[in-house]
Amino acid sequence: MCGIIGYAGNKNPMPILIGGLKRLEYRGYDSAGIAILNAKKFYVQKSVGKIEQLVKKISYRQNIEGGVGIGHTRWATHGKPTLTNAHPHNSCDNKIWVAHNGIIENYKDIKNQLIAKGHKFKSETDTEVIPHLIEEYSKKGFDFKKSVRLAMSDIKGTYALTIINSDEPDKLIAVKNSSPLLIGITKNGQYFAASDATALLTHTREIIYLNDKEMAVLNGTGYQIETISGQSINKKIEVLKEKEESIQKSGFPHFMLKEIFEEPEAVENAINGRLIYKEGTAKLGGIETIKNELSKINHLTITACGTAYLAGQIGEYLVEELSGVSSKVEYASEFRYKNPVIKNNSAILAVSQSGETADTLAALYEAERKNCLTLGIVNVVGSSIARQTHAGIYNHAGPEIGVASTKVFVSQLSVLILLALFLGRQRNLSLTEGKKIIMELSSLPKKMRQILKQAPLIKKMARKYSKFDNFLYLGRKYNMPIAYEGALKLKEISYVHAEGYGAGEMKHGPIAMINKNFPSVAIATTNSVYEKMESNIEEIKARNGRVLAIATKGNKKITKLADDVIYIPKTLEPLEPILTVLPLHLFAYYFGVLRGFDVDKPRNLAKSVTVE
Ligand code: G6P
């Protein structure tokens, strides 16, 4: 959701900014723009739609020898995705250009005050007040840095900003508050600002993560980092480990398919080095320091958004079943605004791929304010959520580029199993049970690869069902959230109506919709609730509904009930979701492709939801 790239150095900023914007495309956007400043001359271009549209409008041959530049992909919040609303935005005197990710909450008041002072606005965005506000301070005689600082003290809201100013043409100022922003540095005078590290991988691996209310001043000869109030700070330089291939399609037609095929590896990466077989438990370095506190907790709230929330739903069941610690999953967007009761000896666990989801971060702030122990399961190292929590576990799933989360979902499930196992072994879970879980968890990647071999069959199923526009996904217990996830994926990338439901609730509503044109996907694996699922399937069939079932290998009986069956290998019931979700991810992928959609960048969706 909105991507920012900035550059200061002696190379032509144009291809660097365009390359960076392409790398940020996956975050979700609907317009894009750049502003470059070289020898007091600005080169500005914007376009609606994909980066290719922007590229068509500019010439790479424009020989700009160094300078500063800012680029932006905009995901519309205030005002439609039009050329006028696209960033960067400028001041009345055209000297100051700004790209912004976040929301300026008091922009209406500021805008009115600025209009009263004679400022003219062109766009409907909240962002446009920023260059005008900086201009106002510059007119009073403050230098660029001081004017930015004063402007920041006037605005309320969230922001990652990159700002250039032709009065001080060698500088790029980057400021952060709640929205993600990091700085990339090199040894040869190239400096970058970006929303995330994937945009910078081809240029540098040396990164400085900005904290909230910090700003960086970059130019071709160096960088300075200060707080917004002007205190200079020494920041640690982190070195990224991500491989360049992890952000390439590597022969796959889409990132989504590549990432589904990486699901077994995502499980391996989540569990590798973390299983202690002889003790039947997990070794989780990130929570080692708080293990005593964890042995005393009697409640765990899990909070997250989107697909991560669905992983959290399974986490709730896992924690209760394996450890006996009471657990509840809550939408972060709800948790942050209600008045959550936080009892002594409880903890909150935020689950987030990006580590930047605004609601999840805000839920953590709320929990922290109430003195709750905060934990995280996060994929992006150094992200805001990772830094906000007291302790946490990284997924190590590598970058996920497809907007719809797939490999990180199974990685989140794997880590949740490890955490539940760890809490369980601190309490009453027996060594034998612990060992059984470890053995089975280790065998999952192999079983997942067997499911992936069925991709051609699943593609055939997707073709068979691709004529339908409504779907009901049903599951029980551990597979109820998988029914939600299957439906969510189909809806996200195919734009068909799909509803996930707890099968036990089917009779309380959804059954009214069933007919021959309203198929159901039923997760009916051989487990403690299999017979119940079988009855649900019978009920659908009695109403002429079609059923595509996900069943356990060896269950021949189900072929007589369901219209179509996709088999998965047998595993322990709490681990089943890691297997049952795989055919549903593939089904959604093929369905979306067959309908002709860009499955990696579904319309209106953003990978990283950095505004609420
Ligand atoms: C967006 C993405 C989803 C993701 C959700 C939560 O909606 O499109 O794929 O599950 O945000 O994101 P997080 O980064 O916190 O896991």
Image (tube, grey):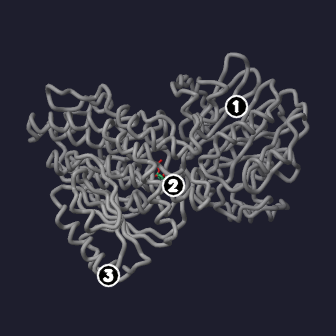
x and y, in percent, of residue 70 in the image: 75, 40
* 345 lies above or below 467: above
Proximity of marks 1 and 2: CB atoms separated by less than 8 Å: no
Residue 410 versus residue 327: which sits nearer the camera?
410
**Residue density around tag 3, few if under 14, some if 14–19, many if 20 or more, within 10 Å:** some
Please state which amino acid type lies under the numbered disc 1: Val
> Which comes before the other along the chain, label 2 or label 3?
3
Q: Distance between the residues labelled 1 and 2?
A: 46 Å
Q: How crowded is mark 1: few (under 14 residues within 10 Å), some or many (20 or more)?
A: many
Q: What amino acid is labelled 2 in the image?
A: Tyr
Labels 2 and 3 touching (C-beta < 8 A):
no
Visible in this render: residue 257?
Answer: yes
Note whether ligand 1 is within 8 Å of mark 2: no
The residue carrying mark 3 has its beta carbon less than 8 Å from ligand 1 = no
Identify the residue position indicated by label 3 in the image: 543
- Give how far across and how far down residue 311 sits, in percent: 35, 51
- Mark 1 vs mark 3: which is more N-terminal? 1
User: Which of the 4 image quarters holds residue 217?
Assistant: top right
Question: Where on the picture, by quarter, is residue 408?
Answer: top left
- Rounded to the nearest angstrom, the CA distance separating label 2 from label 3 is 28 Å
The residue under label 1 is 217
Q: Mark number for residue 590? A: 2
Q: Which of 154 and 326 is in front in this view?
A: 326
Q: Is residue 595 left or right of residue 397?
A: right
Left or right, 99 with reference to 289: right
Q: Which amino acid does label 3 sit on?
A: Arg
Please state the horizontal and vertical placement of residue 584, each as a whole percent of the image.
40, 55
**Secondary element type, mark 3:** loop
Circle 1: element type: strand
Question: Which residue: 29% across, 38% down?
Answer: 444
Q: Can residue 422 be seen in this view?
A: no
Q: In this view, does 234 lie to the left or right of 531?
A: right
